[in-house]
Amino acid sequence: MLNVENIKKVFGKGTPNEKVALENVTFKMNEGDFITIIGGNGAGKSTTLNAIAGVFMIDEGKIEIDGTDITKLPEYKRSKYIGRVFQDPRMGTATNMTIEENLAMALRRGQHRGLKRGITNAEKSKFREYLEMLDLGLENRMTTKTGLLSGGQRQAITLLMATMTKPRLLLLDEHTAALDPKTAQKVLELTEKIIRDDKLTALMVTHNMRDALKLGNRLIMMNTGKVAVDVQAGEKEGLHVADLLKLFEKASGGRGISDRMLLS
Amino acid sequence: MKLSVFMGAVSQGLLWSILAIGVYITYKILDYADLTTEGSYPLGAAVAARFILGGMDPFFATILSMLTGMLAGLVTGILNTKLKIPSLLSGILSMTGLYSINLRVMGKANLPLLRQDTIITRVTSLGFETDTAVIIVGVVSVLAVILILWWFFGTEKGFAIRATGDNSNMIRALGVNTNSMVILGLVISNGLIALSGGIMAQYNGYADVGMGTGTIVIGLASVIIGEVLFGNTSILRSLFAVVLGSILYRIIIAFVLSKGLVPNDLKLLSSILLAVCLSLPLVKEKLSNFVDSIHKNKSREGEASA
């Protein structure tokens, strides 16, 4: 359902800071695939997600969703297909607006916004049910501004916002990296549950090898803007950190594993 | 301060509050410091004066002044979002260009409205005193503006504008063209500012090409005073707070004038007042840190002696 073909992106072209961020990145996703993307700093993980989301236009290559070419589509129009959760908890919600207002905006993702009420009473009771599922007690704080919530609570709400309307593709960009370990674990469990229950197709960037191995049915390892290893469905089962390191070493010529990846 | 002076300040504050609400929309909701204000306010005055002198019904002339202000906002919005000119500079470009346009509209630097039919004389002809008529015009137009905006910012589009100023990345990811929202916000804001100018020309009895100077500072001061004193927990509350802030600002000005301040020094006073208001949050924080540290020192001394 997602087809990423030979995409290339160079930042700061023609300047001394020129950097090839993505080079010939190619992979396909099938309906229901849950791919974890792993790699060191500057490997191009987040850049790949941002390219798919349309944060910037790519220099070469093609991106298709359900056979539709979205390569030239602006970011706000791609939102019809794509739900996103960012690394920074502050990025996912409008902080001066209430929880229910944020959810109401997410409910209208990719739709025309006119002069109808921004939030209805029927929606409010639906949001209450959704929030109860999160089990964070937020169903009683629906008129609280999200700026007053903790990072974990905000990420849980952003996750809810991204998945409420069942996107064709869910993009998770290290969405637990800024949280403390316990909260990160909780948000990760929630992520897994939502993706499983709603049978979503998802791409998750992570720095954490164990999470990358534990979650999802496929794994992509990136290095210096290229796909280094693409572990297909069925091959991932039983793979260990040691195997992954070996695969990676083979692909990258024995270099490029960051300390942060080894430690985590 | 005499009662008549006080009431004059209140009615002026009411008429200025429409401008302040316009400034609130750009500065607070869109997070955009828009200097178009200094051009769209006299534009509204110029258009209203010119068309009233040309024999147009004062209500239509007032509405027309609002529409031309919206056009000015549209230009600033296009400069900023389509041509990628920084927000501050876009406003300055519009403001400067509008100076010439305003002179063209008026034909000269000052256009008196002596013995003309205005929206205020329309109300006095119903049997009200002029002072009362001004208050009526002020209250009715301010309430209408507040009610319409309160409704609008509760709609899907209104939500999208608020989110654009709050977190544009997030709302783009939810499918909103944030450029359009910035433009729409500027259009509404400058429409209100020009409306304020159009009504003010009829209140003052003239339009003047220089009447825009310093208006952004007055607008911002009203917004900040209102917010600090009356809160900002909801849109409706913020809108009323801005109106109260604007009235309070006029009362302060009337007070210092009655104490013998030279009118020529007013703009300096306005700037100082706004600078003080804007620095309040920082001062507050430093002060509470200072108080905390005193408390800590005291409790430490207490532990040491125990």
Image (spheres, grey):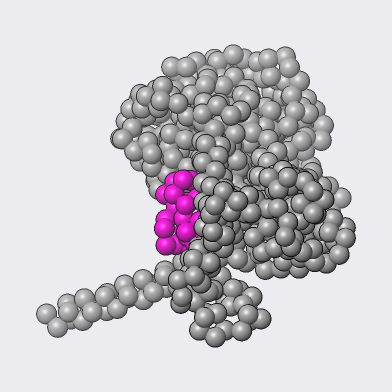
Give percent across and percent down for residue B29.
Answer: 57, 49
> Residue at the location (64% across, 54% down)?
B121
| Residue that lies at the very extreme toward the left in this rendered image | B306
Magenta stretch encompasses residue B233: yes
Who is closer to the viewer here, B187 or A238?
B187
Q: In which quarter of the image is residue A41?
A: top right
Who is closer to the viewer here, A219 or A179?
A179
> Residue at the location (57% across, 63% down)?
B12
**A186 with respect to B189 (left or right):** left
Which quadrant does the C terminus of chain B fall into?
bottom left
Residue A50, compared with residue A64, is above or below; it is below
Give percent across and percent down for residue A221.
Answer: 62, 32
Residue stretch rendered in magenta on the structure: B224-246
Give percent across and percent down for residue A20.
Answer: 77, 43
Magenta stretch encompasses residue B306: no
Give percent across and percent down for residue A32.
Answer: 55, 15
> Residue at the location (73% across, 32% down)?
A74
**Res A118 seen here:** yes
Residue B89, compared with residue B272, is above or below; it is above
**Res A262 seen here:** no
Q: In which quarter of the image is residue B59?
A: top right
**A86 with respect to B233 (left or right):** right
Q: In which quarter of the image is residue B208?
A: bottom right
Residue B63, compared with residue B173, is above or below; it is below
- Magenta span dominant secondary structure: helix
> Residue at the location (52% across, 67% down)?
B9
